[in-house]
Image (cartoon, rainbow, N blue to C red):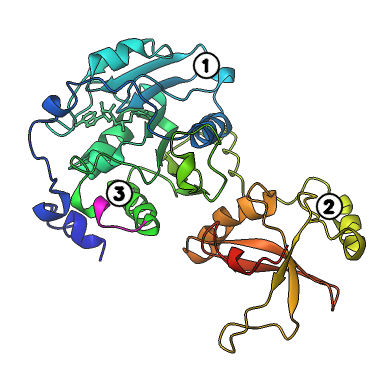
Amino acid sequence: MLDDFFGSPRNRSRPKDHFSRIDESDDALFYSKERLVSHLDSLALETIVDLIEKLVVEDNPKILDLMASWDSHIPSRLQPCNITGLGMNETELRKNEALYDYVIHDLNRDCRLPFADGSFDVVLNTASIDCLVNPVAVFQEVGRILKPGGLFLVIFSNRMFPEKAVKVWRESSEEERILFVEKIFQETGSFDATGIFVSRGRPRPKDDKYAYLDTPSDPVYAVYAEKRGKSLSREPRPPVRSARELETNKELLETKKTQIHKTLACPHCDEKMKKWAVPDNPFEATWDNEFLHICFNDNCPYYVRGWDHVYKTTFRIASYRFMYNQEKGICSSIPVPSAKALRESIIH
Ligand SMILES: C[S@@+](CC[C@H](N)C(=O)[O-])C[C@H]1O[C@@H](n2cnc3c(N)ncnc32)[C@H](O)[C@@H]1O
C-alpha cells in the first residue's frame, strides 16, 4: 500500500494526488508572514529537547535544522554549536538564537540542499515533514550531506497547517504517519535501520492556552536513522526511552509490590491507585471480581513508557496502566487506548 505513495522502484514518478495540498500556491507566499509562536505545548517541546539531547552524541556537532523557524529546540549541553537553519521566513530565522547561519530555500521548488556532501553530523527536522511534496528526494539529499554515521532525526506531532500539509499526511492516522516516515527513510537506501520514539497521553500543562479543552499534551513522535557506512570506532546511539528500560531500582520496585496490599500505591510512581468498578458487561469483563485498583497518574513512568513500548511491539498507539487485584493479590497491567479511557468506572 505504501509503495503506491512513491511509485514502484522502476517508476519513481509519484502519483500526484497523494502529495496534493489544499493550498497549492507558492510556499513563499504562505510563509512570508512570520509566525513567532510555539507550534506545540511546553511539555511536548521539553520532550523534543530531551530527545535531541539523548540522540545527539557527538561533541561539537555540525547541525542542520531543516525547515527551521525561530526555535531549534537545542538542549543547553549542545550550546553553543554550529547550527545552520534552512527555512522560508527570514524574520523567524533571524530571531533564532541557536543558529550560526541560515539559508532561505524552498524545498518544494528545489529539493537539492545547498550544502556539500558529508558536511553535517546531524540533521533535525521538527514539526514540518507534513509539508514536503517530494519527501524521498529531500531525504536522499539529507543522506548526501550527512557524514557517514550522521543522524537524521525527524520529529512530528499531530498539529499541522492543514492547507499546506500533503493529502497523504492529512488523511493518515498517527500510526500510519510513523510508518510513512519509516518508509521514506527506506526508500532512499541511504540510511541504516530506523529507530522510533513515541510519547503520548501526558497531562497538558496547566498554563497551556488549550488547557480548558482537557485533552492530553501534544504527542511527540520521532523516526530517526544514521547514514550508512559509519566508522566502526563510533559508539552506537543509546536506545531512546526503550520500553525494556526498567526502573532503575528493581529491588525497590519488588519491595513496594510486597507492601501494595497495605499501601494501595502504584509501585512505579507511589501515587494512590483508584478503586475501579469492573464493567458489568459479559463481553468486556475478563475479571470475576467486582473491583480492581488502577493507577490513573498520567505522569506515572510505567504508563508514560507504555506508549513507546506498545508501538514498538504491536504497531498500535496505546499504553497500559498498572493494575492491582486486591482480592487475589495480583499485580498486572490493563491496556488503554487514551489517557481518558477507563476513567468512567473510577469509584474513588
Ligand atoms: C510548523 S513550522 C515548524 C518550524 C520549526 N521546525 C519548529 O520546530 O518550530 C514549519 C516550518 O517549515 C518550513 N517550511 C515549510 N515549507 C517549506 C518549504 N517548502 N521549504 C523549506 N521550508 C519549509 C517553514 O519555514 C516553517 O518554519
Q: Residue at x 40, y 30 (%)?
A: 124
Give the residue pinned by disc 1: 60
Viewer-closest of 178 and 208: 208
* Tag 1: amino acid: Asn
Q: Earlier in the sequence, mark 3 or mark 2?
A: 3
Q: Residues within 10 Å of mark 2 (few under 14, many from 20)?
A: few
Q: Is residue 170 magenta?
A: yes
Q: Is residue 291 magenta?
A: no
Q: Residues within 10 Å of mark 3 (few under 14, many from 20)?
A: many
Q: Residue at x 67, y 52 (%)?
A: 297
Give the residue pinned by disc 2: 250
* Tag 2: amino acid: Lys
> For numbered disc 3, what is the local secondary structure?
helix
The N terminus lies in which quarter of the figure?
bottom left
Residue 182 place in picture, x, y as percent: 37, 51
Camera-side mark, 1 or 2: 2
Q: In the image, 302: left or right of 96?
A: right
Res. 184 mark = 3
* Tag 3: amino acid: Ile
Viewer-closest of 227 and 328: 328
Q: Residues within 10 Å of mark 1 (few under 14, many from 20)?
A: some
Magenta residues, start to end = 169-173
